[in-house]
Image (cartoon, grey):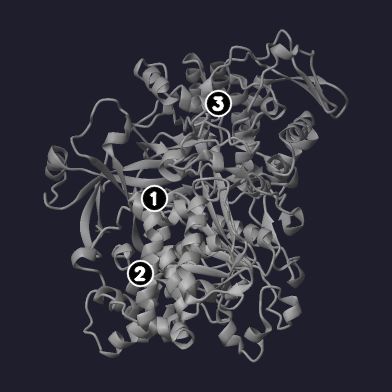
Amino acid sequence: MRNVSLVEQAYEIDPNALVILTEPNYTRKPSDNSRSESNFGLVEVDESMCNLLNSRWLNPDLVDHVLGDVVSVPLAARITLSFLYCGVLTVKLNGEKLNRDQWPRACNHAASCASLSSTTDSIPENMDYVWTWAKELGTGTGRNAENFFSAVGMAAYLAAGVTDQEHLSGRTPTVRFTTVSRRRVPLPLHSPNAQNFQPDFIALPSSAFISDRDETRMNEYQEKPSALGFIETHFPSLFEPYSRLLSAALAPTDSEPSGSYAAQPRSTHLNDAHPGPQLLSKLEELSTQLKMNQLPAPPAWVSNAVEKHRESRFLDMSRVCFPNVLLPGEGERTRMKVAMIRCSAQMYQQRCTQPWLRFSLGLMATKDELGLLRVDATGMEDCVFRKDTGRGVIEAIRLLLGIMLATDQELGHHPAFSLRDAEALSVPELDATTGEKRPAPSTNSDDQPDFKKARTDGASPSTRDPPPPAKYRFREVNFVTLENSKRHLPESSVSTDTHTRYYTKYLLEHQGSLVGRCTRIWCAYKEVSGSEKESLASVHKIDPDMPIFIGPYALKFYCADIKSEAYVKDILRVAQKAQDEGIIKHVLLPTDVWYLGKISDVVRKLKNVATKPENTVLEIKDREEIVTISAFKRTLAQFETGYEFYGAIVGVLKAIGELQDAGLIHRDISMGNIILSDENYANPEKKRDHVHIDFGDGKSIEAALVRRQPAPMPSSGGLHDLDMTAFIPESVPKLANPVLRTSRGVQMAPKKSSERNINIPAGTTPFMSIPVLLGMQHSVYDDLQSTFFVLYLSILTYDTPAPNCYPEAPRTTFQHWPKQVQEWANDSVSLQQLGIQKERFFESEADWLVCLIDNGLKFWLADPVDRTLDECHGAALLEFQQAIWTKVPKSTSRMVLFEKLEVKPREVAAALEKVVEIYKDRLS
């Protein structure tokens, strides 16, 4: 376990290297022609990313923790000694170059420093030892960092193959570093808010590099020779043992190891992972072997892996896209902070396109330092070390070789997810997802801080800017497999199987956040077996040997704050009990819940996460990975008629009342958390579908997707997602002592400090109530006001009713909100200021009502030309407003608003339902 006492708060990021975005996240990103050559390289981040960077932790043991099981310190020490013999490294002591007899002691000292860095915060690094990398490797900065990483990583593998095959543990290179040519546009298949630059280099699966090209798409490959040619030229003694074997034309065999080396990555024992008193003697023994050139030949499985790596010299450009990036890297000549900012921005893009990640890794490099970043749901860690120290040499070897040999899970892939092959058509321009046009790259090296002039002079445009492939090939989630031993609800065992597996049809929602809840939702089908499978096969006349899945279900994966009330008091269990007692009817609750583990245990492995590190003012907020399964429903955006839409709003109001009866408040009512009851299948007569599924062996097998039993609700819709739900607080503002809010701010009777409620706001910003934004305690009333904002914003969001495609993926809806409304989601403004802005807006009908009429979408208008709001929608909106607010005239154009804090949700529901019934024919 790691020692939390080693954690320190890292240095603050220079704000001059950032561009803080103030554009709301809830609007479609417009074309911005202001991004020019002079802006190239500036990193655009929102306030949350800026806060993340400035609250990260400095962990000196990060390399050991991430890759220690891949490359141990003793193995790195033996590689270091080999590097000294072949000229990759040199070392001096007190300014004097050491002779060969002194090299083992220098390597042993380096190993000790590296080992101590992961066990103590006091590292006795002897600066009299100065290590120097061969000048042929270059400075390792900018895009040249890829050359340094590839050469050192592959050289380390060659050295390990002849000096310590056992500690390679049967691993072969599965990852390869590369650069791409289209530097000034985002990497393909990026998210809509991508940066206007690509990573300096990326790590891709080795499978992206091939030896034999497809003759039907020869223009979709770039020649990318491996680092082996460079090593053979500049460090021939390191490559010589392999040259003999490769020149003997070994018969092509499976490159996987066999015999004693076959298999699973070795579980490294403590005496193998860290240097002990025997390491020096073993290094001296190895030194003797190196002097006499008496090392054993590398085993066949190592030589075959080297040969395959050398022959795979063509990069398949259809694989160069964000879903395939294993980790991004950034290089700067001297500015490590800038490299860190740029790298974190690219890691965010990686996370947006890879929902199967448990954590993300990133690399940084300058001419003097290397760095590793890791981000998980609890925050960001970084580890930076100098390349010219003993510790730095050992850590560099462990880092670069470790990445090349790491498994997907060691690089962040969540073990519950398995992937399948997928394709996406290319577009004429890689910027198509953002709609932005950017100027062509300048050939002036002064205008290109991250380019070398030597790379542009004399190069043809086709060389620098190859055409995109016809389609991109990548991976997406195929199965989610959950251990039944980690099932939290229901309490009684529902299966004798050890695991439950879900086939994912498509990803419905992905927040793409690096930290926090990291919510992801799939449309999924559960695999059935035993008697359940026999019954379904009989009812639906399916071959009993065919795999059968039942659904659709909403599979939700998120990370809950373990200090939140919903987690601590197990709100889901409370709500389930209330539903069993008939109290809750309009809330869709999950049928199954899994607790997969706390991030402190499954990722960080900290000894005591509850202890706040002495060197930081920030506490480590631990989170639990949770998976919930519920009936897959249509969302509010998929309403078919106005009557169904309002029926769902009424259902939400009834759900708020039912939660109140159970002593709960939802606290996160938004468009996304409202679902429709009816499961109107696009093809109602078709009770099953047949699909071809890859079960992991590369072969596609036919399987049946069978419809589950319906899960109806009493009204047309209601609520789901109780992640933010809490018990109703004992003390909330009462109507007898009203809170008066005017355009001048908040006016209320002062309270004694002991009586003040400390409120941590929860909710989705545009839908948050005015009292919550102004810092008041959450109450049932706030859920009502949030529902009103859902109704108001729906008129600005949804045009014609969505075509019925259930249960297939719904259409994407882009918000084109007017400026006054966009400001409700402004991340750069305090919540209190947002509350004041929203309050002023609704004090004036000339603001909120005229804005709605001027910007409302066609479906809601009686006459789109004359901009007249349809009578039925206007009546519903005004009835809702009058039910939750009391208006007192202030002037001819403004009102003072009083919240009706004691209004009952069922009263509001009844008032709205009455209006809806009056206009039922028009709404239908």
Q: Tell me if mark 3 has few (under 14), some (14-19) or many (20+) residues whose alpha carbon lies within 10 angstroms of its own.
A: few
As shown in the figure, which amino acid type bears the numbered disc 2?
A: Glu
Residue named by callout 3: 918
| Cα–Cα span, label 3 and label 1 | 52 Å
Q: Residue 300 occupies which quadrant of the picture? A: bottom left
As shown in the figure, which amino acid type bears the numbered disc 3?
A: Ile
- Counting residues from the N terminus, which is met first, the one under dot 3 or under dot 1? 1
Q: Which of labels 2 and 1 is toward the front?
A: 2
As shown in the figure, which amino acid type bears the numbered disc 1?
A: His
Between residue 537 and residue 693, name the one nearer to us. 693
Q: Residue 534 occupies which quadrant of the picture? A: top left
- Confirm whether residue 190 shows in the render: no
Q: Which mark is residue 380?
A: none
In this rendering, the answer to whether 585 lies above or below 789 is above
Q: Residue at x 63, y 25 (%)?
A: 880
Instruction: Indicate the position of residue 15 as horizontal and vertical percent values.
Output: 75, 53
Of helix, strand and loop, which one carries label 2? helix
Instruction: Indicate the position of residue 642 as horizontal and vertical percent values.
Output: 52, 37
- Counting residues from the N terminus, which is met first, the one under dot 3 or under dot 2? 2
Residue named by callout 2: 285
Residue named by callout 1: 414
Seen as rendered, the residue at the extreme right is 891
Count every numbered label the image shows and give the total: 3
